[in-house]
Amino acid sequence: MKLAYVFVEHPIHHLDHTFTYCADGYTLTRGMRVQVPFGSKTIVGFVEKVEDISDEEVRRFPYTLKPIISQIDQFPLLNEELYELGNWMAQRYIAPKISCFQCMLPSKLKPSSTHGSIRMEAWVRICKQNDTKLTAKQQSAYEDLQKEKEMLRSVFYEKWKIPGKKLIALGLVEVFEKEKKAILENIEKNKEEEFILQEDQKKVIAQVEQEKHHRVFLLHGVTGSGKTEVFLRLASKEIEKGKQVLLLVPEISLTPQMVKRVKQRFGAHVAIYHSGLNAQEKYEQYQLVKEHKVQIVVGTRSAVFMPFDRLGLIVMDEEHDTSYKQDSTPRYHCRDIAIYRGKYHDAKVLLASATPSLESYARAHKGVYALLQMPHRINGNFPSVRIVEMRKSVAKGESYLLSDALLDAIYDRLQKKEQVILLLNRRGYTPILRCISCGYVQMCPHCDVAMSYHKEEKVLKCHTCGYSMNVPTHCPNCHEASWRYLGLGTQKLEEFVQIKFPDARILRMDADTTTRKHAHENLLKSFDEGHADILLGTQMIAKGLDIEKVTLVGIVNGDALLNRSDYRSAEMTYDLLEQASGRSGRGEYKGEVIIQAYDPNHYAIQCAAHHDYLSFFQQEMQYRHLTGYPPYRYLVSMVFSSKNNQDIQQSAEAAMRILSKKENCKILGPAQLHKIRDEERCRILLKGKDEQLLIHYVKDVYDKHLQTKQKARLDIDLSPYMLD
Ligand code: ADP
Ligand code: ZN
């Protein structure tokens, strides 16, 4: 009898092993999907292994083997490389294997019984030689189709509705179904975009070219140093060699210019893959790569799993960006996966940023990655930076929103018809509702965080779970009707700026104005085309914009992030300031940046003001060294959650009993976290120098957690990003 070992779809931890089925009559290999009976249901699974056993052995089986119901794929959906990658991820991130396979595939291909079906289209083709007498029109339709061989039925009908239908009725033409495919736009390649390379660019390209095998490079190139051009040149060399190229970006909608430049250079043969696509569009892009219709993919995090089979180069632009980390199981980092695949394909991996993550820069510093530098701006000048000390300006009676210095600078740009970007660091501040008689703050009843006030809809919303409520008329605590809206939101800032500059055309970009599809692109396009004077928004406007006429960037609350209790807060502050100031003065006009801050002497702010990454790196490394945080130590977080606090206590205590016996690691916690969606949470953090050892310890906790059927949920996060 032939046996198939199958991973089934339920990503529930105790199902993280294969189930065995009889596969007689099927030709199966690893990575194919099959339908199998499971309990009373039919579900989809992945074949892990196929094996022949003797009748003797079948008889010794403790239960009767159920047969497979059907085979879904004729070819493995996951090739050997991706299958191995899934295994590696499951082990590294301590996640169920099936969840790793699932996260690699567009949802239409996910091994789930509920996935939407693949969309089909009706086509027509000739199925019988013509032996009857046709009308002139019918004859023309027939010949047209003969010439084209196949046509979309809709196209055929558009041209030949009546004669076309007749040909089908006569049995000369048949209708058949084909999978719907992405239509490649016909874009004219625009060779003129190719510049004469600058010295820095030439040097970096030569350094990468020199390396013939897999190597990880870190390109530290200041904002506006021409990194994109380097990516495009390197990509085109790989494509000439018949290789594939993957260009990873943090968020497509925020980097429309990148997509535009890649398309201009490579014409239509580009796949674009990001979360804004619907399931069908994703599937179509996926197939383009699989069928070798495109050689280059521009995409966000999940594009790292595209079915490449001859990768030559992976570029990861803005490699420091937090969106490269997935925040649900499996909690992978895109950089890890990119390097894994680079090794497999003997391809080069180019990480690039103006503000590299501390981890990557430290690795480059040690020679693990090859460090490449582009310290000069193409236009030769950096924006000058002014820091406004808010404590002083507010004490002088100036507005706490915008200081006189920033207001004057805005006025000046409006006069000169230049453009302004105003950035509000929203993560640090949100408009909250506080009672001024008793100090009560309206909290989310499910999450223990303050509710944010949304003025347009006049409701309170929780930014953690999405719960929304009307503003209570009276304070539930003291029953006074004396609410006050505290803090500073983008809407409030917009109103304020509009009052100060009634004629200015303002665009606001934040989570509320960008919910609709293409909203980002449209806003940015409109600003780029000069339909507004001021673009105002949250961190999303700090990324990747290259707009010639922007000569002033104002950062309204530059140090808001520093107030967070997170070991990365200085790094995030530096990144934000440097990236945001990188948007100013990119063209021929000189740029200026004004940073408003309450703590202007903090090194993150001082270093950003002097565009001095190296100095920031050194100071921040000292701090990380002293406190024992990454990159000096590795971290693994274990979060236990449940609606019942006792379940959590029990699980955490069990984990502590296991961990307290382990050596060469430090245990932080258990710490009570604020609740989310009605669930209490508690975290244990493991810290140590040996990453593999930590993973090993946590796996031990995880296995025992499952074995003892603990009621609390355990979420594991290797190198967690946020610790608050
Ligand atoms: P970065 O990604 O490093 O911030 P970009 O790649 O966006 O910088 O380049 C900044 C600007 O310089 C862009 O407008 C780009 O078109 C232009 N540019 C790039 N390389 C050259 C070059 N060799 N000569 C002239 N202009 C260039
Ligand atoms: Zn909530």
Image (spheres, helix red, strand yellow):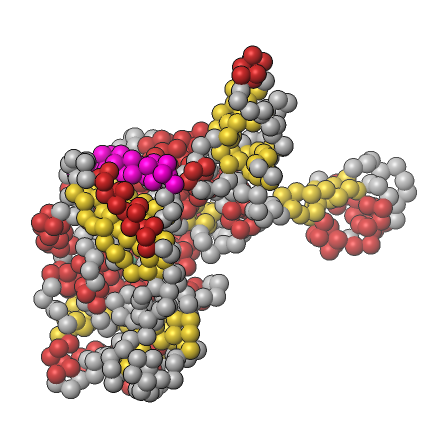
Q: Image height check: is 665 above or below 199?
A: above
Q: Is residue 642 visible?
A: yes
> Is 14 in front, or is 113?
14
Q: On the picture, is 357 further left or further right than 64?
A: left
**Toward the viewer: 337 or 156?**
337
The image shows residue 67, relative to residue 680, as above or below, that is above
The image position of residue 154, as x and y in percent, is 71, 52
**What's drawn in magenta, residue-wise?**
689-709
Rendered position, 594 above or below 364: below
- Compared across the picture, whether 212 is left or right of 148 comes to left
Residue 702 magenta-highlighted: yes
The answer to whether residue 649 is left or right of residue 459 is: left
Question: Looking at this view, is 78 or 702 the one in front?
Answer: 702
Q: How many marks?
A: 0
Q: Position of residue 657 (x, y in %)?
A: 23, 40
What x and y, as percent, mark residue 649? 29, 50
Q: Is residue 535 magenta?
A: no
Residue drawn at the location 70% of the way across and 45% of the way down: 123
Visible residue check, residue 354: no
Left or right, 609 with respect to 5, comes to left
Q: Main secondary structure of the magenta part?
A: helix
Instruction: Pick the quarter of the image with the N terminus.
Output: top right
Q: Nearer the viewer, residue 656 or 4?
A: 656
Quadrant where the C terminus is found in the figure: bottom left
**Residue at (18% x, 55% y) in the render:** 567
Residue at (58% x, 24% y) in the render: 64
Q: Position of residue 636 (x, y in %)?
A: 25, 44
Q: Residue at x 29, y 35 (%)?
A: 700
Residue 379 picture quarter: bottom left
